[in-house]
Amino acid sequence: MLTDKMREAFGYDSFGNCDRLLAEADKDIDIPRAGGDVVCRVCGVKYVNHPAVQGALWATRTCEGIVKL
């Protein structure tokens, strides 16, 4: 997990957002909520073990799309 100072050094605000790093395809989309224990139907790994979205650290990129845990 990143500390606040580390996150700010990368250009993120206190909420984990950095608009300049967010891909155009990831902007202005509806992001559903999901539990971290949900198992991905594509790879079989729990959502909590998938990576954060670059530019929106509060979101998780799964094989099935982006969710907020």
Image (spheres, helix red, strand yellow):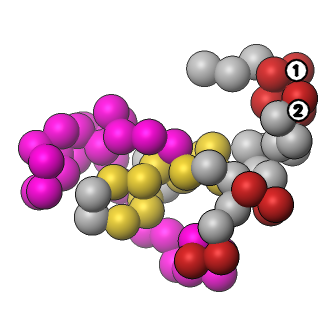
The residue depicted at 42 percent of the width and 53 percent of the height is 61
Q: Quadrant of residue 49?
A: top left
Q: Residues within 10 Å of mark 2 (few under 14, many from 20)?
A: some
- Image coordinates of residue 31 in percent, x first then y, are 49, 70
The residue depicted at 88 percent of the width and 32 percent of the height is 8
Q: Quadrant of residue 10?
A: top right
Could you say which is closer to the camera, residue 27 or residue 67?
A: 27
- Image coordinates of residue 14 in percent, x first then y, are 85, 39
Specify start and end residues of the magenta stretch as a single range: 26-52
Magenta stretch mostly in which secondary structure?
Answer: loop
Q: Residues within 10 Å of mark 1 (few under 14, many from 20)?
A: few
Q: Badge 2 is on which residue?
A: 8
Mark number, residue 5? 1
The kind of residue tagged 2 is Glu
Q: Along the horizontal axis of the image, is 43 left or right of 47?
A: left
The residue depicted at 69 percent of the width and 62 percent of the height is 22
Q: Are marks 1 and 2 in contact (CB under 8 Å)?
A: yes
- Image coordinates of residue 36 in percent, x first then y, are 33, 40
- Image coordinates of residue 15 in percent, x first then y, are 78, 45
